[in-house]
Amino acid sequence: MCGIAGIFAYGGAAVSVDETELLKTREAMTARGPDGAGIWLSTDRRIGLAHRRLALVDLTDSGAQPMANGDGTLRIVFNGEIYNYRELRVSLEARGYQFRSTSDTEVLLHLYADADERMFERLRGMYAFAIWDAVRKRLVLARDPFGMKPLYYSDDGSTIRIASQVKAILSGGAIASSTDCAGQVGFFLLGYVPEPWTAYEKIKALPAGHCLVIDEGGRRELTQFCDIKRELADLGDSPTRTDCGIETARRIENSLADSVRHHLVADVPVGLFLSAGLDSSSIAAASAKSQVSHIDSITLGFKEYAGGPGDETIVAADVAARLGLKHHPRWISEDDFAAAHEKLFAAMDQPSTDGVNTYFVSEAASSLGLKAALSGLGGDELFGGYPSFRHVPRLVGLGKMIPGKTLGIGLRQIAAPIVARLSSPKYASILEYSGSFGAAYLMRRALFLPWEIESLLDPDVVREGFADFDPVAMLEQSIAGIKEDHLKVAALEMTWYMRNQLLRDADWAGMAHSLEIRMPMVDLPTLRAVMPAVAAHPEMRKPDFLSAALREVAGRDLLARRKTGFVVPIRDWLMRRNAVGPGRGLRGWASMVGKRFGFAIREGRT
């Protein structure tokens, strides 16, 4: 895990790379890579690459970046982990490639030389990288299929700037910090800024699963080498009703064990986040069966929830004891939150209504000396654990029984003031947003609905934002070609909520403490192995699929435990400090976050 940066002055009228700007960009990401720093500029100063290093594989100077191949025709900066790099290295050595390090970075360099852009089909991991090809005078940018690792860019038509963080690009000083209208609208709709937008007008995200190639003449080629939507559509083209007994459970257990085994590969100790849920407990069980001799587990506890249903520490401690893990509960209080408030906002690279729990558990892991930790993130998307897997199809069915968006709008206008007194006013729009999967998903996941945002943000921002970002249309596009209802919801959750919030929060919150968060359930081979059984049996609950993985360590209490979701008492903390008005909850937190990022919130709505 690292921080990468680069500047490519490809246009004929472009000025040469400013080394000072590149260094400022790099140093804004020091927390991402406290173990080393590097920079390289071409002799003509048309291309420059920079790197901050968090050393997990090949801890020697041989693994330092920017890294070049033997003749210097290729150079790379890389952020992430390639979990099958050892297998790839063996095959590349058999083809005559010679290695000077034991790093996965050098594997990427030789794999590009061997397979060019066909390399992506052979990679298993989370990654964002930039390769400078001096022979073809081109810059190659790539980001992993799920979007686990971020890669942002700003392109003015003659120079492209890239970095692992939005704020790092701004720190270089050459890009204006004017906010983006679509980014603002997207944030208040969903609680996160959906890619390719960011909070800032001049900066965009390279889409997940894409490769962007820019040559010295300014010619661009953006290709999608992996599409999670397509993966799910292919899995669901002809679903078969497979055996859901011991055989299927074993198959799932073996797949998770294989993923965990790959995700534990490192030259430093790897810990794990352990909650009271099935996902992290399954990861812990697979980790305990691996050949790793010592594993630290970390659980967050909030003093407001101690001993109650929101207390994760009790069950987690029991699981850790059964597995023989060295367990570390970390208790967080309101005072801890207050003390970390400004640091948390400084670390938040893009506005988010989540990530606080990840920030604190990452801090706890870092305090133990860990540089990497496994997380159960992705389990709900993989095994259908969210209520949305039930609620969204029901909303679509309701829309089919009571058609008519106009009727829904009329009922919403009448009901909204009444519903607002009881809960969120968005629930007045159930009929209005129940006609399709995209609309129903927006209804289920929205923080504010479009008609609410009209009174929240500046009218010009709303108008321009929705001109660029049509949420229902984009959500529908995310499931085009998928026939099975369960897989449609899985695609929506994976490519929206998980990609744009959970994975992004894991990146900035972990990197704030120089911690790499690895997610064995967000893994392409695991998706391909597990999802056919899950898609064929959507009526089954998560414990049915995970029972084999947990059978030796989990009692009936864990397998039957009602899903509660991991919550943080932010609302109560902020209300006691008069930061938000009563009853504002997550919406009040969103307004505070939006204000910190300079969003055009209308007077009286903060």
Image (cartoon, grey):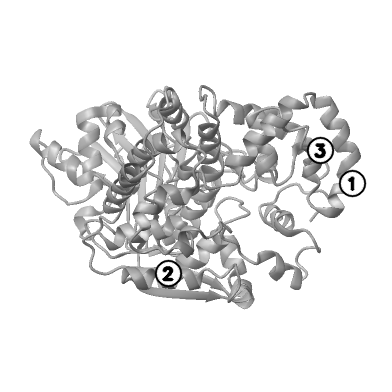
Q: Nearer the viewer, residue 523 or 484?
A: 484
Q: Is residue 216 shown above or below 354?
A: above
Q: Nearer the viewer, residue 526 or 497?
A: 526
Q: Which residue is denoted by mark 2 in the rendering?
A: 298
Q: Which residue is denoted by mark 1 in the rendering?
A: 417
Q: Nearer the viewer, residue 509 or 475?
A: 475
First-in-chain label (2 vs 3): 2
Q: Residues within 10 Å of mark 1 (few under 14, many from 20)?
A: few
Res. 29 visible in picture:
no
Q: Residues within 10 Å of mark 3 (few under 14, many from 20)?
A: some
Mark number displayed over residue 43:
none
- Identified at 40% across, 68% down, the residue is 319
Mark number displayed over residue 459:
3
Q: Could you give the CA–CA distance between mark 2 and mark 1, rounded to whole angstroms?
A: 44 Å
Among the 4 quarters of the image, the one containing residue 241 = top left
Amino acid tagged 3 = Pro
Q: Could you give the CA–CA distance between mark 2 and mark 3, rounded to whole angstroms?
A: 46 Å
Amino acid tagged 2 = Ile
First-in-chain label (3 vs 1): 1
Report the side of 309 relative to 421 (left or right): left
Amino acid tagged 1 = Pro
- Look at the numbered disc 1 and give the secondary structure of its residue: helix
Q: Is residue 455 shown above or below 168?
A: above
- Identified at 62% across, 45% down, the residue is 199
Q: Could you give the CA–CA distance between mark 3 and mark 1, rounded to whole angstroms?
A: 21 Å
Residue 95 position within the rendered picture, expressed as x and y whole percent measured from the top left: 10, 33
Report the side of 59 relative to 34 (left or right): left
Residue 481 position within the rendered picture, expressed as x and y whole percent measured from the top left: 51, 22
